[in-house]
Image (spheres, rainbow, N blue to C red):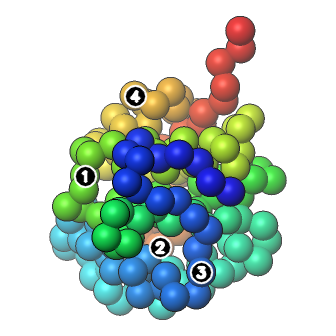
Amino acid sequence: MNVPPVDASLKLRARVEDDWTSILDVWTASWRATYPEIDFDARRAWLMRHIRDLEAVGAVTLCLFDAESTLAGFVVINPTDGWLDQICVGPDRFGAGLGASLLSAARNVSPNLIRLDVNADNHRAIRFYERDGFLRVGRGANTLSGRETVVMEWRPQAG
């Protein structure tokens, strides 16, 4: 699966085993920038198990690399039910359009529906999804932190 990213110098491909260290590094750095009070380094093993479990039931992990072959971000989505479990961009690349590129890749995998939950106090992420056509459709709670979440959904526009 190859979706053209925003910048032609970026490359998108499915995760391979050699990507784990980079995925875990980008994920912890991104979340540390968003919630500095939480020890995301302690959750690295959990994330690896979690993504492997998701992939075992059909989810795909797509990795976005820059011109220097450095991981810029990744997305984990299940094409069967449209559940987007992870989308992550390195904090040094926030606001550079890479999240939109990853959402485009997710729409290629699941063109009829994308659902996700986002921490209710993560206003930057909620604005990002709303700008990209997601609607708030429910509430929930994060299974690890207990934080309140907002369930969001995207469907293609009719017409």
- Rendered image: mark on residue 131: 4
Say above or below: 155 vs 119. Answer: above
* Of the image marks 1 and 4, the number of the one nearer the N terminus: 1
What is the distance, in whole Å, between disc 2 and disc 4 at their CAs? 27 Å
Alpha-carbon span between mark 2 and mark 1: 24 Å
Estimate the x, y position of residue 63 in percent, counting from the top left.
Answer: 50, 66
Residue highlighted by disc 2: 144
Which mark is first along the chain, 3 or 1? 3
Decide which of tag 2 and tag 1 comes sooner along the chain.
1
On residue 16, which mark appears? 3
- At 50% from the left and 27% from the top, the residue drawn is 133
Kind of residue indicated by mark 2:
Leu
- Of the two numbered discs 3 and 4 on the same chain, state the one appearing first in sequence: 3
- At 52% from the left and 32% from the top, the residue drawn is 134
Percent of width and height locating residue 75: 52, 60
**21 to 147, vertically: above or below:** below
Secondary structure under the numbered disc 4 in the rendered image: helix
- Give the image location of residue 110, x and y in percent: 71, 45
Does residue 42 sit above or below 101 in this rendering?
Answer: below
Q: Is mark 2 on a helix, strand or loop?
A: loop
Mark 2 burial class by Cα count in 10 Å: few <14, some 14-19, many 20+ = few
Residue 32 point in image, percent of width and height: 24, 71
SS class of the residue under badge 3?
loop
Q: What residue type is labelled 3?
A: Val
